[in-house]
Image (cartoon, grey):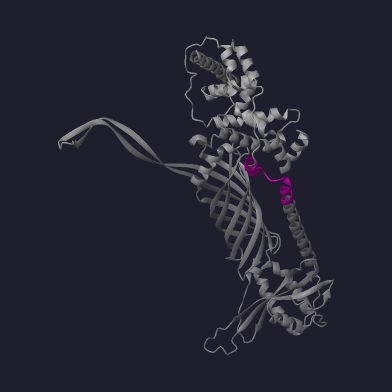
Amino acid sequence: MENLLKHIELSVKQKRASQKAIFEYYSPFLYNCARKYLRSHHDIEDAVQIAWVSIFKNLSKYKHEDKFEAWIKIIVIREAWKVRSQYKQVESITNHSDVISLDIESELFAKMSCENILKKLENIADGPQTVFKMYVLDGYKHSEIASILNISASTSRVHLTNARKAFKKMFVHSKVKAL
Amino acid sequence: MNQEKLEQSLREKFKNFSSAYKADTSMWDTIESQLPQASTNKKKFLFLIVGLGVVVSAFIFYSLVNDNQLDESITKLEVKLDNYSQNELTTASVMHHEESETDEQSIKVIEELSHDTSSANLESESLALDISGDEEFIDNLSGHISGKGLYAMKESTQVHTPSVSDPTLSEESKDEIVRLGVSVGMPFIKTISSRIEINRRHIVTDMITTYVDRSSQDHRNSISIGLVAGVSLLKSSYSLNDGAYQSVLTERQNAESPSIQYNFGLEAEYNISKSWSLLVGTNMSFFQDQFFLESNEVIVDSIQNYEMPSTSSTGNDTIIVGVALKNTTRNTKTWKYSDRLLLRIPIILSYNKSLGHKSKLGIGLGMEAVFYQSIKGTELDLNGEFYDLENDIENRYGMKGASALFRINYIYQITKKWDLRVIADYKKSLRSNYNISAPIQKSFDSLSFAVGSHFTF
């Protein structure tokens, strides 16, 4: 975005034109960030909207040495996590105690679309699922995940382990079905 | 495929994961409505308040300085009265001597004046005109003395007619308080200092009546201290900081209602001038905020082997055995309370207008600092849960708040030292004690009624 810093400066002063310019430019980016973490279009828009309010209210805290996209991405993920916490708990399959040792066929995995993969991941409980997505899809470290989701780093690791098990199990089932 | 490769592959797959999404205008409208206004408005408001404060302060300061100058001038005043006025005024001065120490200086002046009656600069006709008229200023009473205009003002008149049987008889007396002094022209307002008070008896018969106007007594620079007690009607207002709490906010707005607030406190009032006073107080207040929710829950119970008498198609009595479903509606009423104990410190600048002999009406503007001493109880939070205010694990609540204060009070002078006052305050919250991190900020505006009594030192 051209003149981003100027727009940020004016947005801090609550100049609506600059705020709207930033909103229009970065809304698709935030939407796609939130899309990985939430199920419905309605929920995604909710999270994005709340994130924008939070972004504009806290814009004065934004440090210019950070990348703006990374900064707003953290905010939208945090809001998505809050929206997720309002979901009814889905049946968790992370409680299965049997150890999954089968490998996933690369062919099967390659054929799946991103939407289908996200749909599959929705079967994992909220905590492990979100940590898995942040760690694997968005490349956050455990310390960063802990800070964003307000959990401990060790909890983040436990969630990731559980999510990995559940993930493997799901794709084994898919493989069996495919066969 | 091992785990690491799998995740690497997954990351690559999602690298270009995006969909065509266009910013929604209606979403922007919603966002905009939740954003604070441009700071320029705040600045303008701040400048306005500060400017107003400076003007009021300057006015008070100028009044005080001018009053002091007038005080000095008046002691040197050489007003010459004719014989007619002299006799009346001398009598009157004795009466005032008994009433107030502050009038002693006036008496001296009057006596001094009464000794020198030969060269009358003050026309007796002018003074007579003033005394017989209604409350008004006589601008051309005696021209100017040391650049300041002399004035006389009649404060009040009371006519007593003790003889009902024959009112045509001249059994009546007029008691009139006359003030003499000097006035100084100011750019926007005329300030008057009234240091000589004369109770002038215009006696038609030999009837003597004493009339004392306590409300006009000069309490300048005096301090009064008093107690006040009262109640406040509170009105809650909310501010949403976290959009996820929209439904919680709606529910709280429907279900919460603050109870009456009880106030008790100590006040000290400093009379800056005859009309202006500055009041500082310390008040303890207590109120409860109530949350009430009523809900109906339907409970379905199954009864196994339930036997139901019936009649078969052939007309025989029979019993149907099966599983019966029983619906029970459970009405649940929930009350939750949060208690708040506050220390309030108001500071009010008041303008007081005399209403008659013993009473005056004051109008004041000020600020009130609010210090929350304790907050106990709960507030509705996400997912129907209640947030514990006392523990406040998310640090949502601060202990300080502030309100703007508008006061109207009626003061009745019971005795020379004691007064009784009825007070009505409207307080508009300027700063909530909730932190900005609180998902919902709550503040209280109030309408207060109180009674109190002050002792003047």
| A78 over A105 or under it: above or below | below
Question: Residue A8 appears at what percent x and percent y?
Answer: 74, 36
Q: In the depicted view, which residue is nearer to us: A73 or B38? A: A73
Residue for point 55% across, 10% down: A103
Q: Nearer the viewer, residue B98 or B309?
A: B309
Whether B442 is drawn above or below B323: the answer is: below
Q: Please tell me whether residue B28 belongs to the stretch shown in magenta.
A: yes
Q: In this view, does B403 lie above or below B329?
A: below
Q: What stretch is highlighted in magenta?
A: B26-45
Q: Main secondary structure of the magenta part?
A: helix
| Between B383 and B188, the one nearer to me in the picture | B383
**In percent of the image, x 63 and y 15: which residue is there?**
B9
Residue B131 seen from this side: yes
| Residue A77 can be seen, yes or no | no
Q: Where is residue B33 in the image (x, y as percent from the top left)?
A: 64, 44
- Left or right of B7, for residue B56: right
Residue B268: say if magenta.
no
Please identify the quarter of the rendering in which residue B373 is found. Answer: top right
